[in-house]
Each structure stands twice: as C-alpha cells, then as structure tokens.
C-alpha cells in the first residue's frame, strides 16, 4: 500500500511510504483479539505512517499514533478495550538505521521511543 487506506481485522499490509506519508485507519468497533499487522517496505523514517485510531484508543491514549522508525513490523492487537502495539525492528547490523549502537540512541519523537521500547521488551 502506498496511499491512505482502512485496515480490516487480521489484515497484513506491506506499506511503502517512498511517495509520501500514509494514514492507516484502524478497524471500527474492534473486539478482543482483532489484530492488524503493518510492514515497512520502504523507510518510515523518511515518511511516516499515521495510525488513525478510528474512535478507539491506542495504548489507552485517545490520540492518533505516528510510526516513524524504519525497518519495522508493527502488530496492533485489540486487548482490554485498547489497541496494544507490538513491534520488531529490522536490521541491527552495520547496515541498519541505528547500526551497532541500537541500544543507545536519541529519538525524534515520543512515538518513536515508545515503539522502540516495546520492540526491546
């Protein structure tokens, strides 16, 4: 996907933001266990993905969520009346965005720090 779209439960989406930012609208009226998986196939660091919460909360917060860490796979699972964010970050070797110092870095935004913290557990 390279333009705005509405996700459906159990959907898996490869998102290309090379042409600009993309907004993903989460499913309306989710139920426990619903999930959506988003995969970075470009570099979300250059152009981010915005999660439109569509009336629900994300991590118990009533704000949309910006994904701006490149090489990411994000899974959102609806648990306890909120979308929970689980992520894994791609390359951590010398070619990765953070290189070998991935454990010690400064983040440009709170959502980037939250996603990174979740990925590390």
Image (cartoon, rainbow, N blue to C red):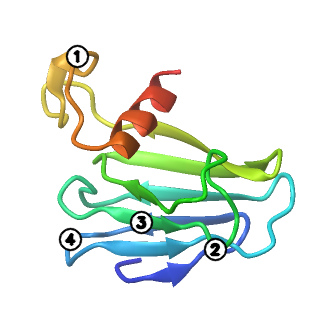
Classify 10 Å Cα crowding around label 4: few (below 14), some (14-19), many (20 and above). some
Residue 46 is left or right of residue 34, and the answer is left
Q: Which mark is drawn over residue 50?
A: 3
Question: Do the CB atoms of the residues marked 3 and 2 lie less than 8 Å apart?
Answer: no
- Identify the element where label 4 is drawn: loop
The residue wearing badge 2 is 54
Name the image quarter holding residue 84: top right
User: At 20% from the left edge and 28% from the top edge, which residue is drawn?
Assistant: 106
Q: CA distance from mark 2 to mark 1?
A: 34 Å
Q: Residue 18 bears which disc, if any?
A: 4
Q: Residue shown at 37%/83% (left/top)? A: 3
Q: Give the left or right position of residue 11, taking residue 24 as reference.
A: right
Dot 4 or dot 3: first in sequence order is 4
Image-based side of 72 in relation to 53, left or right: left
Q: Is residue 25 left or right of residue 120?
A: right
Expressed as whole percent of the image width and height from the top left, the position of residue 83 reads: 68, 52
The answer to which of marks 2 and 1 sits earlier in the sequence is 2
Residue designated by label 1: 104
Residue visible at 81% across and 72% down in the picture: 29
Residue sitting at x 20%, y 23% = 105
Decide which of tag 4 and tag 1 comes sooner along the chain: 4
Mark 3 residue crowding within 10 angstroms, few (<14) / some (14–19) / many (20+): some
The image position of residue 66, as x and y in percent, is 39, 57
Residue occupying the far right of the picture:
32
Q: In x, y percent, where is residue 107?
A: 24, 35
Marks 1 and 3, the one that precedes in the sequence: 3
Of the 4 image quadrants, the one containing the N terminus is: bottom left
Cα–Cα gap, marks 4 and 3:
14 Å
């Amino acid at each position: 996907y390279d333009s705005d779209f509405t996700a459906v439960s159990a959907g898996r989406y490869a998102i290309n933001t090379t042409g600009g930012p993309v907004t993903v609208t989460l499913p309306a009226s989710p139920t426990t266990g619903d999930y959506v998986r988003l995969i970075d196939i470009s570099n979300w660091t250059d152009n981010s993905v915005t999660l439109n919460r569509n009336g629900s909360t994300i991590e118990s917060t009533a704000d949309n969520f910006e994904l701006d860490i490149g090489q990411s796979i994000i899974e959102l699972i609806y648990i306890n009346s909120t979308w929970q964010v689980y992520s894994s970050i791609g390359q951590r070797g010398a070619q990765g965005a953070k290189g070998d110092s991935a454990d010690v870095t400064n983040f440009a935004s709170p959502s980037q720090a939250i996603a990174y913290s979740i990925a590390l557990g």
